[in-house]
């Protein structure tokens, strides 16, 4: 029996490469070899022990893999496409139990058992439940979709987190042609949001502090950019967005920074009666001071959006096949590290200098 490796969190900001036997997939399961995994902002937070549930777990959830073994009864992906050894697939990184209260309300993105496997220590068989690893075990019922040959690994590696998340978020909160979207943060999520909003005919204003990311935002369909270097104060950024929207404000403000203060700023950036999508802030302990009266007076609608309905990953793959030639999706992961250098990859991901760094095991 051959062995594989998995990057396991064993303490705050402490990762260990552990080695385990590569499992045979049971009935309904699929074994993948990981081809390319991105370092997402959430991985950096998990690395710093900010996820209570995933403190002893493996790291990595944004990746593309290749089918190396099919369990009994598996002959297609979750769109009915025939599946064979060697096919590239992207997995939904959480489970949907179809039995818990959120699943019974068809809120599959909120499944209470979504992390039931991932949260386990990798020493528990079948070991490979996360993406910074040589292998990944797809459990029975875990959604996954085949990647068309026309879409390269570099382009599709971020589909199962960032892109699916943005397609779902924008559908949940709504964005019509001609409306203005303000994106707070032009990292992976912000760039995907710009691309999705661009296709839907909305006007996009991206806010970020890193010049290269603002440049990328334009390449992904942003019409205007607001740099934190030029507008370091919140009030100045709000004034700039007012100016860019004829004194109206944004129809939709999308928070994908993970910076608590940006939630408060979103309320100021939104127009009267506008919408706010809170996606980036996930920390359960970070706090912020705000004036609830502004929410009432402006009648803004605030939507928290966690994860996505699994089939949005299928939409994400189709979106890339359709739109990949219009935006530099491959520029998302412009720096790659071998699995043995996972800590360096996490540090580079944390520095926020590029949209994504990748691990190529
Ligand atoms: Zn992610
Ligand atoms: Zn459930």
Image (cartoon, helix red, strand yellow):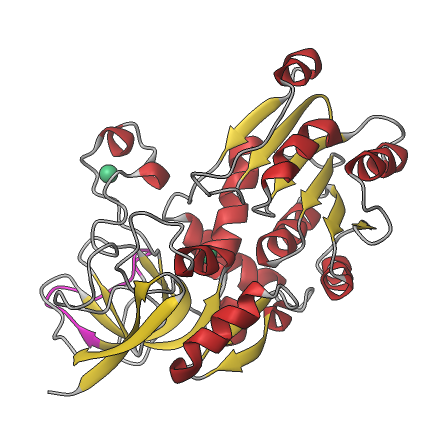
Coordinates of residue 222 in the picture (x, y in percent) = 76, 52
Foreground residue among 267 and 71? 267
Q: Nearer the viewer, residue 76 or 213?
A: 213
Give the vertical position of 250 relative to 204 (above or below): above
- In the image, what residue occupies the spot 9% across and 63% down? 27
Image position of 296 with respect to 215: above or below: above
Quadrant in the rendering for residue 271: top right
Q: Position of residue 320 (x, y in %)?
A: 55, 62
The quarter of the image holding the N terminus is: bottom left
**Stretch of the chain drawn in magenta:** 69-80
Q: Position of residue 70 (x, y in %)?
A: 18, 72
Whole-percent x and y of residue 43?
44, 60
Q: Is residue 240 left or right of residue 42?
A: right
Whether residue 76 appears in magenta in the rendering, the answer is yes
**Which quadrant would the C terminus be assigned to in this image?**
bottom left
Magenta-highlighted stretch: main secondary structure? Answer: loop
* Residue beneath the point at 60% across and 55% down: 192
Q: Is residue 76 left or right of residue 197?
A: left
> In the depicted view, which residue is nearer to us: 340 or 185?
340
Residue found 77% across the figure and 58% down from its top:
218
């Amino acid at each position: 029996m051959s062995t594989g490796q998995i990057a396991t969190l064993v303490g705050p900001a402490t990762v260990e490469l552990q080695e385990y036997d590569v499992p045979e997939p049971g009935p309904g399961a699929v074994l993948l070899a990981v081809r390319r995994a991105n370092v997402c902002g959430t991985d950096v937070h998990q690395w710093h022990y900010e996820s209570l549930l995933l403190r002893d777990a493996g790291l990595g959830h944004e990746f593309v893999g290749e089918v190396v073994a099919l369990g009994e009864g598996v002959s297609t992906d979750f769109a009915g496409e025939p599946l064979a050894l060697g096919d590239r697939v992207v997995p939904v990184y959480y489970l949907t139990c179809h039995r818990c209260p959120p699943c019974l309300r068809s809120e599959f993105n909120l499944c209470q058992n979504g992390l039931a496997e991932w949260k386990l220590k990798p020493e528990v068989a079948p070991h490979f439940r996360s993406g910074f690893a040589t292998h990944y075990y797809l459990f029975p019922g875990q959604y996954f979709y085949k990647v068309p040959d026309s879409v390269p690994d570099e382009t599709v590696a971020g589909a199962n987190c960032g892109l699916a998340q943005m397609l779902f978020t924008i559908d949940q909160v709504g964005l019509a042609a001609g409306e203005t979207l303000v994106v707070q943060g032009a990292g992976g999520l912000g760039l995907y949001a710009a691309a999705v909003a661009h296709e839907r005919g909305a006007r996009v204003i991206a806010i970020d502090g890193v010049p290269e990311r603002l440049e990328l935002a334009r390449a992904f369909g942003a019409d205007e950019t607001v740099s934190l270097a030029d507008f370091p104060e919140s009030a100045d950024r709000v004034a700039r967005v007012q100016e860019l929207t004829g004194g109206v404000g944004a129809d939709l403000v999308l928070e994908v920074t993970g910076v608590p203060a940006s939630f408060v700023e979103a309320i100021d950036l939104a127009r009267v009666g506008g919408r706010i999508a809170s996606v980036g802030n996930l920390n359960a302990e970070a706090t912020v001071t705000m004036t609830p009266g502004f929410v009432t007076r402006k009648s803004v609608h605030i939507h928290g959006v966690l994860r996505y309905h699994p089939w949005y990953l299928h939409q994400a793959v189709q979106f890339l096949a359709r739109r990949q030639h219009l935006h530099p999706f491959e520029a998302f992961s412009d720096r790659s590290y071998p699995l043995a250098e996972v800590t360096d990859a996490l540090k580079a991901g944390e520095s926020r200098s590029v949209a994504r760094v990748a691990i190529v095991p």
